[in-house]
Amino acid sequence: MKGDEIVKTAQAIHDFIQLAIQNGSSTLMDKIYLENKVLAFIGEHSMQPITQTISNQPLELLDILIETARKNEVIQTTTDQEILKAQLMDILTPMPSQINQAFKDLLKKDSQQATNYFHNLSKKNNYIQTRAISKNIHYLHETKYGAIEITINLSKPEKDPKEIAQAKFVKEMNYPTCQLCMENEGYLGRVNYPARSNHRIIRLDLNEEQWGVQYSPYAYFNEHSIVLNTKHIPMKIDQRTFDNLFAFVDKFPHYMVGSNADLPIVGGSILTHDHYQAGNHEFPMAKAKVRKVVTLHAFKNITTTILDWPMSVLRLQGENKSDLVHASLFILDKWKNYSDESVQIVAKTADSIEHHTITPIVRKRESVYEIVLVLRDNNVSIEHPDGIFHPHKEVQHIKQENIGLIEVMGLAILPPRLKTELMEVEKYLLKEENTICAIHLSWANELKETNEITKENVHRIVEKGVGEKFLQVLSHAGVFKDTNEGHLAFERFISFLNEFGKN
Ligand SMILES: [Zn+2]
């Protein structure tokens, strides 16, 4: 490296360690020791800082350090780079015990201060990938249910071809057991497994069980957090889930919290590790209008409503948590055994395979607790081999993945392939040269027939078209459709619930 580059690097190291001291992860006494650590990490051998600060922004300094490491050939692949970034950011991050103590002290005063502290720290140390997240495409789409949110997820890094080739020779490993296990805290990372040196987890007690809280590195919404069981045990929606969700909002009343369903097709992408998702966001479903107020005879203290939403949603509100837990458990149990073949709803098939479960979401508004129960069914048919209540063939060109917790609430997470594919659709609509995918062709033709397309409006028309498709996706996932027939079927289910506890 040239002399001025060496000086610049040294100053970047100096500034970087200043941040560690300011953050409270180290003291002035650690300065020389840490500077030497950074030198070793990036393949440099001496410190000669200039006197002018380069930056106090961790990411800007990180860029300089990574660039030096690349020039020194300490890192070759994307994996090397991700590992080194996390190792460097680890230096800026206090130890788990320090963070947990600070969080605990703040929590005693004010839960919002506690989450702000940990959220800011997770952003500053680059655990939350703010740069990558800012690449996501996000917009609102107006529907008769209110505005829904559409996101094209571009934040997850693309695999480097060198890595794909390397991966073939990598030995299968089972440590950490999965990406939600506690053992990820501080884990170095490897090919095909994320670097977690700068990862920290807050320990939390929920109904005398040990849980952990972390922010999602690729947040889909504000303060998107993951609440994870400290044991690697499968997802299961039962009384414990309901109890824990309520316990969570008691600790963090400014957050909503929900769980993915516990069956394939209607669950999230990880069914093998029990976890919830929480955050500081008002989802479209939380703003949905009431379609109908219903009475559950067994639970007269609870206000029960059917929400005006494309999926089938019961909202229970009340001041007493245990009433709400009992009512939720009652509805879950009855739903698990409820069939209505006139609308293709079958609770169990051969060998008593269960098909019914619930996606629950809890929040607290002042002294009123609220739990939203989304009825789910993962059965398949000859006509719908991927799932009767899963995105059907005609919408899979936009979305074919599971409809999990976040999407249920009206926030679409669409695959990255759409970014380029939709650009080709736009060109096709403008009759420009294009490489439109065959899967989008009939939809594009529909858009062409129903719209007057110009260069100015084509982007908006495609965005709206995608929004409409996502609305269709949600209605496919709804067990009782938003039609007269569906409304009557929903009422039959409510009557079924009221056959119990009549007095
Ligand atoms: Zn796990």
Image (tube, rainbow, N blue to C red):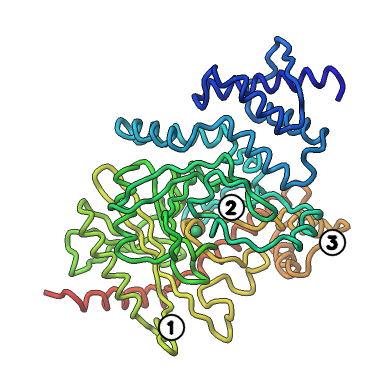
Q: CA distance from mark 3 to mark 2?
A: 24 Å
Give the mark nearer the N terminus: 3 vs 1: 1
Rendered image quadrant of residue 305: bottom left
Which residue is at the far top?
Answer: 51
**Residue identifier under label 1:** 353
Give the mark nearer the N terminus: 3 vs 2: 2
Counting from the top left corner in percent of width and height, residue 338 is at 34, 80
Numbered disc 1: secondary structure: strand
Q: Is residue 396 left or right of residue 181?
A: right
**Amino acid on which disc 2 is placed:** Ile
**Amino acid on which disc 1 is placed:** Ile
Give the mark nearer the N terminus: 1 vs 2: 2
**Residue identifier under label 3:** 435
Numbered disc 2: secondary structure: strand
Question: Quick check: 231 above or below 44?
Answer: below
Q: Residues within 10 Å of mark 1 (few under 14, many from 20)?
A: few
Image disc number at residue 150: 2
